[in-house]
Amino acid sequence: MAVERTFIAIKPDGVQRGLVGQILSRFEDKGFKLVALKQLIPSRELAEQHYGVHRERPFFSDLVNFITSGPIVAMVWEGEGVIASARKLIGSTKPLEAEPGTIRGDLAVNIGRNVIHGSDGHETAKFEIGLWFDSKEINDWTPSDQIWREE
Ligand code: DAT
Ligand code: MG
């Protein structure tokens, strides 16, 4: 399986509730590599672009209001199959339907406060990474224990 990159963001509820550390740990523990990270309060324009596919949905304005309401932690994670695997770690969009053991399954109740975002495919990952990060903010690096991660 190819090495990929995905865009992950801890939403304002995750930051306000002090869940940043344990969410980062889940991706580190799994063995994925962090290649970019920053905290920011998204502008309306950025939020509307990010959620552009949902523009016509009834919840769009609530979603944009929520995501711009405070700091988020934006990240790029790298690894084999990381796009689909991150979605599994995150769990279903509706937290009450998300399996225990997933981030949403363990840490959230409401769909409008579901703690974390993760790209849902190759094209969206590429689009979202480019939207949220300048290429200079993304680091190519080799973990010193890389040999223990490979077969
Ligand atoms: P995901 O975040 O799992 O990729 P999505 O892309 O379908 O889910 O929707 C983006 C976000 O919009 C989601 O995390 C929470 C919100 N959302 C989705 N469906 C909703 C609904 N029916 N009511 C309220 N908010 C919703
Ligand atoms: Mg989505």
Image (cartoon, grey):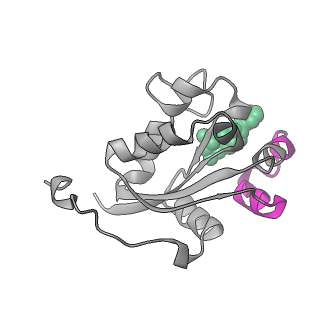
Q: Residue at x 53, y 25 (%)?
A: 105
Quarter that holds the N terminus:
bottom left
Image quarter where ligand 1 lies: top right
In this view, the residue in front, 119 or 42, is 42
Q: Is residue 74 left or right of residue 46?
A: left
Magenta stretch, overall SS: helix
Q: Residue at x 35, y 57 (%)?
A: 79
Q: Is residue 147 left or right of residue 135?
A: left
Where residue 74 sits, quadrant-wise, is bottom right
The magenta stretch is: 43-62
Image coordinates of residue 6 in percent, x first then y, are: 48, 57
Q: Is residue 60 magenta?
A: yes
In this view, the residue in front, 131 or 73, is 73
Q: Residue at x 75, y 58 (%)?
A: 42
Image coordinates of residue 123 in percent, x first then y, are: 53, 63
Q: How many marks?
A: 0
The answer to whether residue 57 is visible is no
Q: Residue at x 72, y 50 (%)?
A: 71
Q: Is residue 89 magenta?
A: no
Q: Is residue 80 left or right of residue 96?
A: left
The answer to whether residue 150 is visible is yes
Image coordinates of residue 35 in percent, x first then y, are: 44, 64
Image coordinates of residue 22 in percent, x first then y, are: 48, 37
Q: Is residue 42 above or below residue 14?
A: below
In the rendered image, the residue lying farthest to the left is 151
Where residue 97 sits, quadrant-wise, is top right
